[in-house]
Image (cartoon, rainbow, N blue to C red):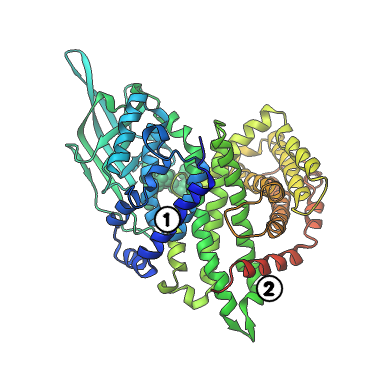
Amino acid sequence: MPRLDTDTLEMLLTTVRDYAERELTPDFLLKLDHEDTFPAKVLKDLYDPSQIGLNLLFIPEEAGGLGGGAHDIYRLCEVMAGIDLGIATGVLATCLGADPILVGATPEQKSAWMKRLVDEGLLMAYAATEPQAGSDLAALTTQAIPVQEDGRLIGYKLNGRKQWISNGGVADLYTVLANAPGGPSWFVVEKGATGLTAGKPENKHGIRASNTAALFFEDVFVPADSLVGGVEGKGLAQAQAVFGYTRLMVAAFGLGAGWAALQRAIRYSQTRIQAGGPLSGKQGYTHKLIAPNAVRLEAARAYIEWSAERIDAGEPDLATEGAVAKYSATEAGNKACEDAIQALGGYGYTREYLVEKYKRDVRITTIYEGTSEIMEWTIARDRWQLHLKTKGAWFCDWAARLARESGGSTASGAPFAAAALSALAALYERCRLDRLTRSQHVLFRLGELTSWAETAAIFSERAVTKPTQAIALSPQLLQTMARVHAREAFYRVACEGLRWANGAGQGDPELASALDVAGALKAQAGLLPDLDVVAKGLVEAFPVA
Ligand SMILES: Cc1cc2nc3c(=O)[nH]c(=O)nc-3n(C[C@H](O)[C@H](O)[C@H](O)COP(=O)(O)OP(=O)(O)OC[C@H]3O[C@@H](n4cnc5c(N)ncnc54)[C@H](O)[C@@H]3O)c2cc1C
């Protein structure tokens, strides 16, 4: 995937921010939230090329779009989520809806449908989930029955029901996953098709500015060339092919909402005086509610940026990296928003201060586009296979490379991250020898710990070699944050790894030493001074206006 030049991307982001400042005021957003209203005009404005033309970002240049890459879309999703995650979801749904076409359509189909997206600024919806087929999409029951005329296939009739579809009640065009005789396949369905109806908008916990609705298909006829790619049975593979990329978008949602709430808390802490001084100067507050959240969010960002670069360089099969990015960023975003409410005390619990809205909104990011548990499973399953295929070398080699390249410097915590990867290798191996992953819980915990170790490795490396440009944090501060994260990753992999392996009945009395539990505890020396630096750095980065 190509990438926009920095000036074009920044110009687009500035246009979005300016529009939001003008039109999407806190009062307006709170009203949408309160009244559970989908802001059709806002979506129209955002898609209108004479105003912003956001949808052009994910449409290839040859089809008249801007041809943005994964990095560009992550940046846009973060900015949008910092404004309103409900509106961001409406925008994302078009991007998601277009994905099966971008990945699987024939060149003729692609140019015809993309042209319509550009010319007409169409809203799209991506209809995969069904009442009985959520995490387990293969259980889908919507049918696509071939319709023949004079022995020639002229189209399909769709019958079934889709559940929880973003833009479901407002889209102009739908991509719908249905079982054809050759297997699950994507079909493009126009709004107003006879037999297609949408349910009433769901009354949701958060993202109330987004429209979510069930869809009902009763003998909905679609012409044969509505089958994406023209060949039946490719649907699940086409959905899988974009996971690396689409999960990065939701990861960026977690990042954007998490940072938006946290920045409010950081600014609030500077003006709120308790016990004779501002909260921003009190360790019991900052080291619990503020600094660890900023660390986790930035660790996730480093991983997102690393994955996006690889996608943009044309590397295929990055669904596992997409899963680590989504899991770490959305869990971090969710925790940051939760802690932001606590950080604002009673004010945080009221609507007016917005952090409780961010919290309700961000909650969806650990559910849609694959739940956190499904991410844990995906990560563990995929890395397990690599562990077996490389006879345990996968994490060991990564650890050795990281330790070598950092030259033993603890500036960004690389030796701790390397130790976390080594401990992970020992844990996977013990799980293999004692068949511990027969317990599903152990397998899922492996997914969680893998995510900690991998984000630590990438953050500690990139804080030195490629510090992010997307947020105003100095490289020195990022390095300290990476060191805090690497310490925690090492601690978690060694201590929690031992806990779950022991809990599942592992048989090696030396496992604590193989995981270097003692080293993980020793690595915590210096943690509090580092958290002091992070807390102070955040106040400097986000002063009260
Ligand atoms: C607001 C909103 C917008 C959405 N937008 C869209 C959209 O635009 N298009 C679309 O196609 N879908 C959409 N979805 C659907 C969403 O992707 C699914 O809700 C999600 O994938 C989870 O599926 P489910 O709700 O059926 O939960 P389930 O799959 O039933 O999961 C319930 C719980 O069980 C856990 N679980 C599931 N399987 C296992 C397992 N094997 N082992 C252990 N634990 C398990 C899950 O992690 C979860 O905690 C949306 C959902 C919502 C709420």
Residue furthest to the top: 151
Q: Amino acid at mark 1?
A: Thr
**In the rendered image of this protein, does residue 185 appear above or below residue 442?**
above
Q: Is residue 377 visible?
A: no
| Local crowd size for mark 2, using a 10 Å CA cut-off: few (<14), some (14–19), many (≥20) | some
**In the rendered image of this protein, does residue 108 appear above or below residue 34?**
above
Count numbered badges in the picture. Answer: 2
Q: Secondary structure at mark 2?
A: helix
Residue 450: x and y in percent read 64, 44
**In the rendered image of this protein, does residue 98 appear above or below residue 331?**
above
Looking at the image, which is closer to me, 20 or 151?
20
Q: Looking at mark 1, is its residue's CB closer than 8 Å to ligand 1? A: no
Disc 2: which residue: 283
As measured in the structure, the alpha-carbon distance from the residue carrying label 2 to the one carrying label 1 is 38 Å
Looking at the image, which is closer to me, 243 or 422?
243
Disc 1: which residue: 15
- Asked whether, in this view, residue 12 is left or right of residue 525, the answer is left
